[in-house]
Image (cartoon, grey):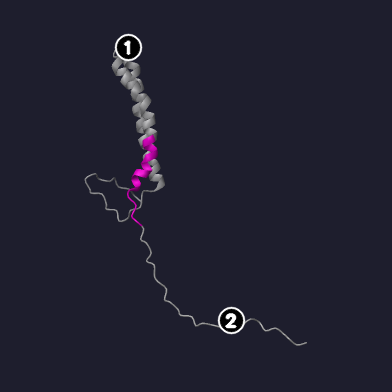
Amino acid sequence: MSRTPRHRDEPRAESITRARPGLSQDLRGRQRRYVTAMLVRTACVVVMALTWNRWPAVAVCALAGGVLIPYVAVVAAQAGWRQQRGVRPELARPVAETAPRVVLEPTLVLPPEQNTAA
């Protein structure tokens, strides 16, 4: 099976279901977001180290970014799956069908006969 590159000019196919993406696709997306955030954090730490003596204000901002980005990255990675779920359609409620009424005939219940032979 050959794969052709997807052209960005083509419109995306319409989805006919409300099914969410598979777990492996969701996990891959979360991993990409987390790695990207960690690369930005690494850049913040490098900028902080390079600018500490020359521009302390830039270094402090980079330090704040290096401290806050891991928290934001973890929260965003964990919340990604819930965001993709969307609004759940309300389930159809079953229509309660009334059972036809059955008229029972009255019956007479007699006590069991006692043997009175002596």
**In the rendered view of the protein, which quadrant contains the C terminus?**
bottom right
SS state under label 1: loop
The numbered mark at residue 109 is: 2
Q: Which residue was labeled with disc 1?
A: 53
**The residue stretch that appears in magenta:** 75-90
Q: Residue furthest right?
A: 118
Q: CA distance from mark 2 to mark 1?
A: 105 Å
The mark total stands at 2
Report the mark closest to the observer, 2 or 1: 2
Q: Residue furthest left?
A: 9
Q: Quadrant of residue 90?
A: bottom left
Q: Main secondary structure of the magenta part?
A: helix
Q: Amino acid at mark 1?
A: Asn
- Residue 55, given in percent of the width and then of the height, sits at 28, 14
Q: Quadrant of residue 36?
A: top left
Q: Residue at x 34, y 43 (%)?
A: 83
In the rendered image, residue 9 lying in the magenta stretch gets the answer no
* Residue 81 position (above or below residue 50): below
In the rendered image, residue 84 lying in the magenta stretch gets the answer yes
| Camera-side residue of 82 and 24 | 82
Q: Residue furthest top?
A: 53
Which of the two labelled residues, at mark 2 and mark 1, occupies the earlier sequence position? 1
* Residue 72 position (above or below residue 83): above
Q: Residue at x 39, y 41 (%)?
A: 28
| Camera-side residue of 87 and 18 | 87
* Residue 24 position (above or below residue 69): below
- Residue 30, given in percent of the width and then of the height, sits at 38, 39
- Residue 18, given in percent of the width and then of the height, sits at 33, 53
Q: Amino acid at mark 2?
A: Val
SS state under label 2: loop
